Image (cartoon, rainbow, N blue to C red):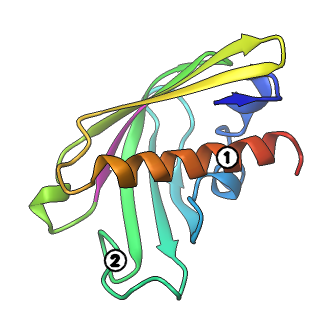
Amino acid sequence: MEIAASPQAIYAAFSAPQKLMAWLPPGGMTGRALEYDFRPGGRYRIALTYDASAPAGVGKTADRTDVSAGRFVALEPARTIVQSVAFESADAALAGEMIITWSFEPTPAGTRVTVTAENVPAGISQADHDAGLRSSLQNLARFCQGG
């Protein structure tokens, strides 16, 4: 997705938990950072909660909540963020560590943001994962563009 903001502005949107929680939760969810240490090797833990209109039992960790934890594997300011992510869940289909890479490439109109995810748990459909990432990217664009 191309965003009309500089790579530095997009990278900065990850740099503090209050910024991240302003845009990361996909539509129909809110988020809070339980732990957030934005540095190479730094750990984080976040909770995303579905709105009350979501069906009961939709959460991966609790009724309407997904909790995930991980670490920042690599940070290249204004270029790349590589993070590990694991859901806290009793469901074996949601087990395992994903690696998510966010890449920022300058373009004449701003920045092309590319997200790749490796080792997505079998319990998350590709369609649902893609929809969540697309929603987060749209939120990121609004956040970085000030609207």
Query: What residue is shown at x 49% (from left), y 73% (from top)?
Result: 49
SS under mark 2: loop
Query: What residue is shown at x 35% (from left), y 88% (from top)?
Result: 56
Principal secondary structure, stretch drawn in magenta = strand
Q: Of label 1 and label 2, which has the lower sequence position?
A: 2
Q: Horizontal and vertical percent for residue 121? A: 21, 48
- Taking 50 as reference, is 92 above or below it? above
Query: What residue is shown at x 55% (from left), y 45% (from top)?
Result: 134
How many numbered discs?
2
Q: Residue beneath label 1, please?
A: 138
- Taking 49 as reference, is 5 above or below it? above
Which region of the structure is painted magenta? 83-87
What amino acid does circle 1 point to? Answer: Gln
Q: Horizontal and vertical percent for residue 137? A: 62, 42
Which quadrant of the structure image shows residue 120? Answer: top left
- Choose between 107 and 87: the one closer to the eye: 107
SS under mark 1: helix
- Choose between 30 and 142: the one closer to the eye: 142
Q: Horizontal and vertical percent for residue 22? A: 70, 57
- Taking 44 as reference, is 67 above or below it? below
Q: Horizontal and vertical percent for residue 130? A: 43, 45
Query: What residue is shown at x 82% (from left), y 28% (from top)?
Result: 5
Q: Residue beneath label 2, please?
A: 58
127 with respect to 109 (left or right) = left
116 with respect to 4 (left or right) = left
